[in-house]
Amino acid sequence: MTVTYNLSVSTASHLTAFYKVMFRWKGSVWKLVAAEMLVWYLAVVCTLALDACFIATSDYGEDYHQFIRWLSKCANSNFIETLPFLLGFTTGFCFDRWFSIFNCLDWPNNAAHMLNTFMKGRKLSAKRESKLRNTFARHLRLAYILIFRDISMVTRKRTPTMEGLVKAGMITQKELEMLHAGRISEDACKYWIPLQWIIVRIREMRAASKKDSLMSDYESVEFFQEIANLRGNLGDLLSFDWVPMPIAFMQIITAAVYITMFLTVFTVQSGVVDKEGKVDYLIASWTIITLSAQLLLYLGWMKSVHVIINPFGEDDDDFEMEWLLDHHTSVLNTLLGKRESGKQYAPAKGPEAQPNLVLTHTVGSLLRATDRGIKGSMADVNPREDPSEYMPTT
């Protein structure tokens, strides 16, 4: 779920503006690194205790401290110094990829508006127009469901099987059989087929009779181009999910950060515990504070990269895929399921008799469902000024 904070930083001149953001928990760097930092602190305390109580006063204590000094040199080697460069390069690449994915989140509003506009001037019976509207809305909605099921775990949990979509009325049994009847592999994502059904339906009506055609020549060209753009953007979403960042590169970044954390567990002991097992707590505290600050930056940097690699997951800052499905369903129901007067188009019989379909939930998806969608950061702000006090301008 996307974490918004624009309201808290609406002005940069306020002294405490960005402090409100720094101490948030949801989606924050503190939440991302809490588990690893806790393990690191426990490991540091345990190794210091073992060194002070047992190792320092033993026969091999000097050899152990010599080994610790060698590890401290490794931790300050050139390899570790290149870690900020690796993390910075990876972050830049991932952010560029994240924005490209965001730009591919095409909405069905334009296609629905075009259908709604082009169909108004046609001489169709109310029953036939209602059936066409609900069919087109169902096909557009199905295209989004099919693509989101293959790239988003949230959507997959909500629509685990195609039979569930049949029960929810998102697709008819005949359409489901047509979806699986082609020569395309069963495992392939067939999100584009419902869009093709819309084009075929419009072409068949134009070929049968120009009087019964839904669109003129110009309108059909514009609408087909909109469908092609929509199909292209949805296909790009699948491509981004199919080809992630090279796994070897991510392994290098992750291994470098965790190796650094492992080495620093032992470098804390360098110069802190003497031969008699006494601990200099002042030096130990200062060393732990400085190293933890450095590790917090490195680990938080790496975790941020992990989050933005796949924005379709279940992290706090991932895209609201579940809300997007509900929004698209609501928009299609509104634009293609209502008359100008507000009355619903509803045929008497058939699977198209349900103009306002809603995608159902499973138990798992319902537990994490949210009604917070896309809205302005100031939408819930109520100004203190009384509107009656406003003065007309002169």
Image: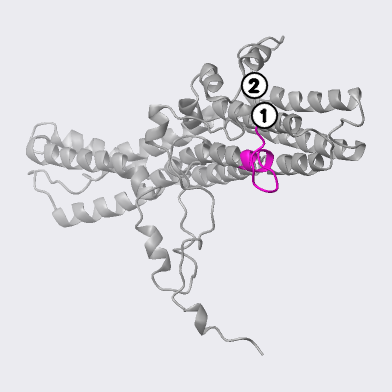
Q: Position of residue 206 (x, y in %)?
A: 88, 27
Name the residue: 33% across, 53% down.
293
Left or right, residue 314 beside residue 291: right
Majority secondary structure in the magenta region: loop
Q: Which residue is mark 1?
A: 347
Which secondary structure, mark 1? loop
**Total labels drawn:** 2
Name the residue: 38% across, 28% down.
363
Left or right, residue 125 beside residue 180: right
Name the residue: 38% across, 49% down.
29
- The amino acid at mark 2 is Gly
The extreme front residue here reads 348
The reply to whether residue 105 is in sight is no
The reply to whether residue 321 is in sight is yes
Instruction: Report the front residue among 334 and 154.
Output: 334
Quadrant showing the C terminus: bottom right
How dense is the environment of label 1, judged by Cα within 10 Å: few (below 14), some, or many (20 and up)? Answer: some
- CB-based contact (under 8 Å), mark 1 and mark 2: yes
Q: Relative to 160, does residue 113 appear above or below in the rendering?
A: below
Q: Position of residue 139 (x, y in %)?
A: 67, 28
Q: Relative to 157, does residue 217 appear above or below in the rendering?
A: below
Residue 350 numbered tag = 2
